[in-house]
Amino acid sequence: MIFTIAIDGPAAAGKGTLAKALAQHFGFAYLDTGLLYRATARKVLDGLDPVAAAKALSPHDFTRDGLRTAKVGQGASKIAAMPKVRAALIDFQQKFARQQGGAVLDGRDIGTVICPQAEIKLFVTASDEVRAARRFAEISQKNETATLALVLEDLRQRDQRDRDRATAPMIQAQDSILLDTSDLDASQALAKAIAIVALHPGLLT
Ligand code: DC
């Protein structure tokens, strides 16, 4: 069975948590595509050329410290605006999406560019304030220093860059379902998403 669930949306909207839980529920493979850009950006911070860094990604690059920091997030957003960087990462993502057994991918362009034929497309969002509060709570647990205002500013800057770029901008696919998680906790968001996916006839083939 080939079945792709594409999950797109702005930073810290709960895409990753939802995507991972959906993949577990349906027994599908899961890919956090943001990690590809973060791992590339981390190598660029070490001094590598962005396109060369993207082409040379290896499993070790995804386990490095600091991939989730705001600095690497901003770097990822910047190199993600480069068409040649995106081109270097597209083939892997497309193969992952159409593998046998089902796949869930979360990112910015999954339903529009990576897998326009995805059986299910969700655009997951939440208000800026809710997203910033969630990210701030995550960061505080790790003892990293930040303020809510700085986290909000960081998310807004990154979203604007991701939305305004010319290549594969973050945009809701016309045939996607909008899931606003502002007033939902993780298990409520998961229940809604499961109800949407479970109705798809492709799951039975
Ligand atoms: O999902 P994330 O916050 O880890 O992603 C980090 C950055 O990578 C994000 O700001 C933009 C970029 N990205 C992208 O351009 N396309 C994707 N499919 C996933 C992430």
Image: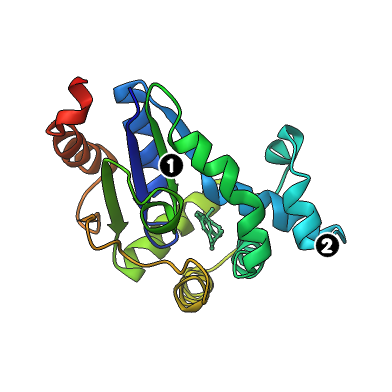
Tag 2, which secondary structure?
Answer: loop
Q: Residue at x 52, y 36 (%)?
A: 95
Number of the label disc, if any, that sits on residue 35: none
Residue 68 image position (x, y, % from top left)? 61, 51
- Residue shown at the point (28%, 48%) measured from the top left: 121
Q: Position of residue 28 (x, y in %)?
A: 38, 25
Q: Which residue is mark 1?
A: 105
Determine whether 90 is above or below 83 in the image.
above
Position of 167 with respect to 85 (left or right) is left
Q: Is residue 204 visible?
A: yes
**Callout 2, which amino acid?**
Asp
Residue in front for this viewpoint, 97 or 13: 97
| Residue under the image location 35 percent in, 20 percent down | 27
Q: Residues within 10 Å of mark 2 (few under 14, many from 20)?
A: some
Q: Which residue lies at the image location 53% right of the left edge and 69% below the top edge?
A: 147
Mark 1 vs ligand 1: CB below 8 Å: yes
Location of residue 200 (image quadrant): top left
Q: Which residue is mark 2?
A: 49
- The vertical placement of 60 against 182, above or below, is above
- The CA span between labels 2 and 1 is 26 Å
Marks 2 and 1 in Cβ contact (< 8 Å): no
Q: Amino acid at mark 1?
A: Leu
- Relative side of 69 to 187, left or right: right
Is residue 71 visible in the rendered structure shown here? Answer: no
Quick one: quadrant of the C terminus? Answer: top left
Badge 1 element? strand
The x, y position of residue 6, in whole percent, is 35, 46
